[in-house]
């Protein structure tokens, strides 16, 4: 399988190249040259298969350049935590994607990407340095995903004093191959330092630099597998045979794109709901055909505060750049902060389940879709983060302090180790290669 750039001004590449490049040289994203179809007998027997087998069957169609035993090994190293489908009420089900080390779904993609990179590096006997700028969550998922992975060292740049203590502890207490850089500046400064580093030929050569941002196919493709798994569990555990609607709380739209890929490959999904907060440029596009990126607005579900979602371009490719076609498959909902709080409250009162604000946007969208469009099919809602990651919002909604799971409380007890850097490129470069 080859991967092509959306603009089409760069040559098609192997998965290995797409993984190492991240973005195509023409500035656009890589997409698979086609979305392969799963064999019909595989799909009909889905509910009898363990997760690793489903993941292997799906990913091997894209990653045929990796020999089967090696791909199985990468899958085994990456999907190491449970992804349960739990019943919420009536026809609503939560796909809990937050049982990984940083308690958010980004762990799945980050781990797979790390293990795939490490696989190619071992083959080639070389080492690389990964730079990642973070405003909080991405950094900890990447740091944990790459922790102790051979042949890779990671520098996570974060703005000093501008992330939560919990987020900081998750990045600064690992040690080993993970270096936390506390930048005296803003998130934009961190991002600028990463960009400047990647454009600095001396640095790139000396450290074999690359980055690990969310547009990487190595993070996107593995996410398709949990939607197939969820559909299988719906049948196996809950004896539902009707095709489900899949609801995805969306920011950069990577998670929804992965779900759409699963459907295109033959996984039985009726349609999708794009659940957004007030940052709803894709919603406006679906309703009007006009795509106008804006600056993002801050909300309670801040991992979805994105004004120009990078994976929108990938969705357009799937639907032949026709918004009516996309709208036929994806129904948008935009949920305000106020309604997000109400949903956390309502769901808690009705079911005892505590939702994080992102999942609450999803659950509220699902309810709205059910009543406004009178949809009675089962709905699978991607539950993207553990509520303990958003203590203040949850407390505001229901007045309860969510107990921290062990992963988080352990990291709070450990000693922070970070390296401080000014926000100037010269200082940062001297830190990476001291002269
Ligand atoms: C990143 C993130 C999202 C949004 O996912 P996209 O793939 O960017 O659409 C939703 N919820 C949480 C908790 C996240 O961390």
Image (tube, rainbow, N blue to C red):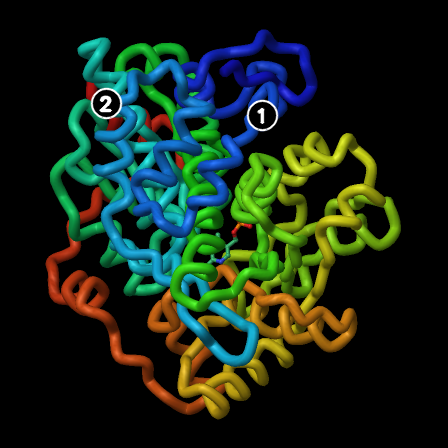
Residue 364, by quadrant, is bottom right
Residue 3 rendering spot, x and y as whole percentages: 54, 18
So how many labels did they put on this image?
2
Label 2 secondary element = helix
Please give the name of the residue rendered at 71% of the width and 57% of the height, measured from the top-left corner. Answer: 280
Instruction: Specify whether 184 is left or right of 264.
Output: left
| Mark 1, residue position | 31
Pointer 2: residues within 10 angstroms few (<14), some, or many (20+)? few
Q: Position of residue 392 (x, y in %)?
A: 42, 78
Q: Nearer the viewer, residue 77 or 44?
A: 44
Can the viewer see residue 23?
A: yes
Disc 1 secondary structure class: strand
Q: Which residue is mark 2?
A: 69
Name the residue: 40% across, 25% down. Answer: 60
Q: Is residue 252 visible?
A: no
User: Is residue 196 found left or right of 410 in the rendered image?
Assistant: right
């Amino acid at each position: 399988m080859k991967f092509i750039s959306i603009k089409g001004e760069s040559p098609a590449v192997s998965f290995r190249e797409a993984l190492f490049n991240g973005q195509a040289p023409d500035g656009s994203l890589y997409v698979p040259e086609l979305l392969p179809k799963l064999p019909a007998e595989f799909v009909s027997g889905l509910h009898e298969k363990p997760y690793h087998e489903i993941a292997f069957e799906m990913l091997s169609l894209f990653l045929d350049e990796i020999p089967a035993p090696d791909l199985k090994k990468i899958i085994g190293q990456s999907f190491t935590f449970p992804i349960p489908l739990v019943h919420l009420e009536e026809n609503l089900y939560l796909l809990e994607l937050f049982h990984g080390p940083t308690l958010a779904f980004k762990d799945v993609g980050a781990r797979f990407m790390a293990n795939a990179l490490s696989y190619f590096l071992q083959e080639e006997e070389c080492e690389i340095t990964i730079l990642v700028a973070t405003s909080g969550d991405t950094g900890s998922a990447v740091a944990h995903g790459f922790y102790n992975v051979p042949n890779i060292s990671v520098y996570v740049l974060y703005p000093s004093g501008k992330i939560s203590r919990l987020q900081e502890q998750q990045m600064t207490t690992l040690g080993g191959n993970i270096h936390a850089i506390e930048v005296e500046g803003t998130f934009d400064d961190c991002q600028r330092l990463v960009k400047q580093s990647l454009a600095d030929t001396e640095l790139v050569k000396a450290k074999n630099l690359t980055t690990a941002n969310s547009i990487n196919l190595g993070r996107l493709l593995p996410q398709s597998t949990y939607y197939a798994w969820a559909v299988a569990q719906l049948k196996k555990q809950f004896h539902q045979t009707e095709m489900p609607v899949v609801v995805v709380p969306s920011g950069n739209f990577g998670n929804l794109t992965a779900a759409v890929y699963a459907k295109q490959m033959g996984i039985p999904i009726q349609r999708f709901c794009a659940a957004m907060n007030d940052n709803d440029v894709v919603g406006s596009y679906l309703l009007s055909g006009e795509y106008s990126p804006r600056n993002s607005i801050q909300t309670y579900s801040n991992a979805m505060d994105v004004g120009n979602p990078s994976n929108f371009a990938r969705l357009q490719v799937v639907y032949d750049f026709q918004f009516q076609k996309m709208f036929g498959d994806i129904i948008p909902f935009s949920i305000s902060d106020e309604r997000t709080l109400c949903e956390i409250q309502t769901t808690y009162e009705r079911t005892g389940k505590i939702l994080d604000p992102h999942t609450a946007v999803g659950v509220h969208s699902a309810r709205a879709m059910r009543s406004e469009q009178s949809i009675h099919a089962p709905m699978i809602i991607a539950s993207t983060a553990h509520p303990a990651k958003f203590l203040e919002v949850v407390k505001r909604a229901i007045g309860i302090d969510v107990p921290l799971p062990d992963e988080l409380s352990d990291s709070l007890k450990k000693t922070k180790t970070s390296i401080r850097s000014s926000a100037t490129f010269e200082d940062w470069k001297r830190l990476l290669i001291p002269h």
